[in-house]
Image: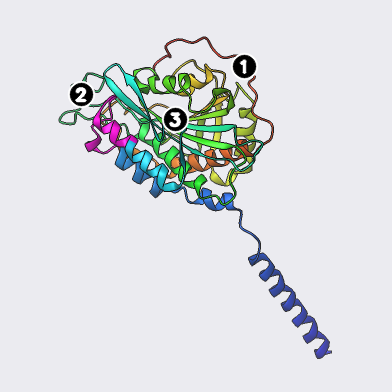
Amino acid sequence: MWRSAARACLGVVSCAVALSSCAERQPVDPALVQAGTITAAGIRGRIAAIADDSMRGRATPSPALDRLAAYAAQAFSAFGLGPAPATGFIQPWTSPGGTAPNAVAILDGGDPGLRNEYVLFVAHMDHIGTASESLGCIAADADSICNGADDNASGVAAVLELARAYAGLRARPRRSIIFLLVSGEEEGLLGSRYFVAHPVVPLEEIVAAINFDMIGRNARDSILVIGMDRSSLGTIMTEVGLAHAELGMRPASVPWRPGGSDHVSFDSSGVPTLWFFAGVHPDLHRPSDTVDRIDAEKAARVVRLAFYLGLEIANRSPRPVRTAPAPPSGRPVAR
């Protein structure tokens, strides 16, 4: 009797060991691994550098904005991304006060049939400078620099962290991905309008544009996603949000409005668009929009959500479809 029991016990133990060993050998999802590299510390570090006092509020044009574009170009190259055709990593354009930069890089897709279609991530690098530059920055006592940590160092950090995460994937997404940082947003979307007028790839082959502008503040468990009601991207966004409930980040659809950020330049040109936006706050366009007020942990979860969204768009065979007409062109409504 004891021998039978012992054999049964050994069998159970052997089975448990085998199952444990099998579980240990389960392949790890590479997308999960790369999404995990997007951290609060990484986001905060980039925002701190971009919104530092030495950047003088990144007015368009300015030496600080040129330095930021060069920093982005260097990062893109270090990640192993390719430069844009014709322009390289820097696309210069003429602003009312001189020459200003856009920074752009491309991750080539892995599917020969889809790699000539593109998912685009965009954010604006510029802000409103200092109180002495008459761009709307108002000094607060001795502080005369509008650092723009949330507006929009948070968005720039998002695009840079996405570029690094996607570049680390062993298996390339089926479609190619464009990472675009523009300037001149605060003056009327000038840099993104220039890009749309002078695209580095055929505009009709950009299947989706995902904009990040102010993603680091307000409610910890949700992010506003403007444009979900205008194309099939809304359905994809909902599906991705449900599939990644572990992020604790609910994408909240809000009605479209005809202004506010660089997504308008793409939407007006017929490209399906979404805008990730955490909402306004009293520090907007004030010297108090500083890195210490950023919720970097929230921002990291927003960027991970966007990582999964971009991967889903890049890998689905049908391209996104617009369900609303493009709005009439014209100067956008300011935030």
* Res 217 seen here: no
How far apart in space, not on screen, are marks 3 and 2 (Cα)?
37 Å
Name the residue at 44% across, 40% down. 299
How far apart in space, not on screen, are marks 2 and 1 (Cα)?
40 Å
In magenta, the rendered stretch is 51-69
Q: Name the residue tied to disc 1.
A: 324
Q: Earlier in the sequence, mark 3 or mark 2?
A: 3
How far from the left and from the top, in percent, is residue 256? Answer: 53, 19
Locate residue 140: give its quadrant.
Answer: top left
Nearest the viewer among 278 and 56 is: 56
How far from the left and from the top, in percent, is residue 133? Answer: 21, 21
Q: In this view, does 176 lie above or below 164?
A: above
Q: Name the residue tied to disc 3.
A: 86
How far from the left and from the top, in percent, is residue 30? Answer: 58, 53
Residue kind at label 2, given as amino acid type:
Ala
Nearest the viewer among 44 and 205 is: 205
Residue kind at label 3, given as amino acid type:
Ala
Residue kind at label 1, given as amino acid type:
Ala
Q: Which of marks 3 and 1 is nearer the N terminus?
A: 3
* Drawn side of residue 27 relative to residue 70, left or right: right
Name the residue at 54% across, 12% down. 327
How far from the left and from the top, in percent, is residue 194? Answer: 42, 20
Q: How crowded is mark 3: few (under 14 residues within 10 Å), some or many (20 or more)?
A: few
Q: Which mark lies nearer to you, 3 or 1? A: 3
Q: Name the residue tied to disc 2.
A: 131
SS under mark 1: loop
Question: Quadrant of the image for the N terminus?
Answer: bottom right
Q: How crowded is mark 1: few (under 14 residues within 10 Å), some or many (20 or more)?
A: few
How far apart in space, not on screen, are marks 3 and 1 (Cα)?
33 Å
Q: Which mark lies nearer to you, 3 or 2? A: 3
Residue 68 in magenta stretch: yes
Residue 13 in magenta stretch: no
